[in-house]
Image (tube, rainbow, N blue to C red):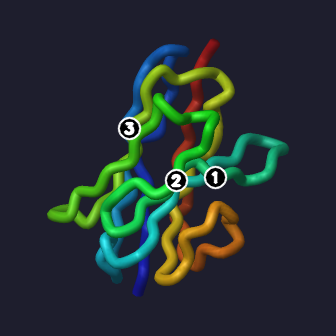
Amino acid sequence: QVHLGESGGDLVQSGGSLRLSCAASGFTVNTYTVAWFRQAPGKEREFVTISKFGMNSRIADSVKGRFTISTDYALNTVNLQMNSLKAEDTAVYYCAADQWSIDRNYRTYNYWGRGTQVTVSS
């Protein structure tokens, strides 16, 4: 059974850094598309970045140059390093995976974690 679990969310000051992790079970992360999305209160869930075959595929303009996705094959985990955090990065961050899709649209992903809260104070 596929399961995704996010961790690492926290309260951090503007300009700080956080590292989020998505631990996967039931599949190997380098064989599926794994993506990060985020959703702020009252807003639509939005694309952050995705990885296919253990490599970066796409990244949102809003986080380009600040966020980096990486894969730890030994732990079957996908990480999101977030630097130079801004107040507008405040959101629940979700890990998603799908066997076939490499899409920015969250509706195309079959498997989801429960999310981890990132709050950036200004």
Q: Is residue 63 placed above or below 54 in the rendered structure?
A: above
Q: Quadrant of the N terminus?
A: bottom left
Three-letter amino acid code of the residue under disc 2: Arg
Three-letter amino acid code of the residue under disc 1: Phe
Q: Which residue in the structure is indicated by mark 1? A: 47
Q: Residue furthest left?
A: 74
> Sequence-wise, which precedes: disc 2 or disc 3?
2
Q: Which residue in the structure is indicated by mark 3? A: 81
Q: Quadrant of the C terminus?
A: top right
**Dot 1 and dot 2 residues touching (CB under 8 Å):** yes
Q: Position of residue 51 (x, y in %)?
A: 42, 60
Q: Is residue 60 placed above or below 15 in the rendered structure?
A: below
Q: Which residue in the structure is indicated by mark 2? A: 58
Spatial CA distance of label 2 from label 3 is: 15 Å
Q: Residue at x 42, y 81 (%)?
A: 2
Q: Secondary structure under badge 2?
A: strand
Three-letter amino acid code of the residue under disc 3: Gln
Q: Quadrant of residue 108?
A: bottom right
Q: Position of residue 25 (x, y in %)?
A: 33, 75
Spatial CA distance of label 3 from label 1 is: 15 Å
Q: Residues within 10 Å of mark 3 (few under 14, many from 20)?
A: some
Task: Tell us which disc is closer to us: 2 or 3.
Answer: 2
Q: Secondary structure under badge 3?
A: strand
